[in-house]
Amino acid sequence: MQYRSDRRVPPRLVEDLSAQYSAAISAELIRRPDIALTAIVHSLALSVFPGLGAAETCLKLNAGNAYLNRIIGDPESCKALAVVEQERERISSQMPCNTQALWSWLLSRSCDELLGLLAFIAASAVDAVQRKPDQPDLPRLVHARALAAALQLDPGNWFQPTAANYFGRIKRSQILDAIDEVNGSHAPALDKLKKPELAARAEQLVAGKSWLPEPLRSVVNGTTCAEAAE
């Protein structure tokens, strides 16, 4: 039996998944100081040269990314956040302990070291979260997809759907849809399982199949981070 359920992902889950997408961009950006430099110059140029027209990028240069911990349902399991936090700790261990010494410390860094620090600053500023009122064509989200494309981001390297982070948070019919999409169909016995058991079984059935929830899959296709849930 093929299910054709309401495929809209709950707004809170869209927010969670797009926060993990944002963290994945950050983790990749740390490794690419060249693109980080481009992203920062692009963001600042839009504010310095008004003739370019009003536009919003996904870099919030006056804010860090700590808020992602509050958006992602299980931040401890987010691989991308772990990479960002590890790099934060590494850099913090090398920096001076007070702001007065920071300028002198920066002047003594090599160009490569400064580019690495710049990449982390850009990574910390990424905001690709699709919140409930946001439409997929919001300029900030459009820029996030462009940045992800430049990084050749594959969200599958950073997110694997589990019962805890995805299947347990959607409808039964959507769980079965996912299983059908991966395997072509599902065993009738799955229809009789309680939702927690079905979510756990779905995690097993999609493992290693490169399957992603639609909000992340559409990023791979370069179209939209998620269909806005109503």
Image (cartoon, grey):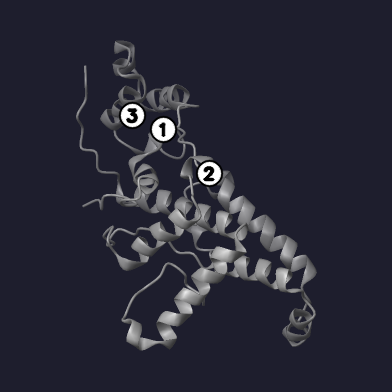
Looking at the image, residue 229 lies above or below residue 131? above
Q: Which mark is residue 158?
A: 2
In 3D space, how far apart are the residues under numbered discs 1 and 2 (Cα atoms)? 12 Å
Q: Is residue 109 visible?
A: yes
Query: Nearest the camera: 102 or 200?
Result: 102
As helix, strand or loop, the secondary structure at mark 2 comes to: loop
Three-letter amino acid code at the position of disc 1: Trp
Q: Find disc 1 in the rendering and name its residue.
A: 211
Looking at the image, residue 230 lies above or below residue 35? above
Q: Find disc 3 in the rendering and name its residue.
A: 178
Please tell me in which quadrant of the rendered image residue 2 appears. top left
Badge 2 crowding class, 10 Å Cα cut-off, few under 14, some 14 to 19, many 20 or more, is some
Q: Does 4 sit left or right of 68 as displayed?
A: left
Q: Residue 176: give x, y in percent of width and height.
A: 30, 25
Give the mark nearer the N terminus: 1 vs 2: 2
C-beta proximity under 8 Å, tags 3 and 1: yes
Please report the residue visible at 21 percent of the width from the left and 32 percent of the height from the top. Answer: 5
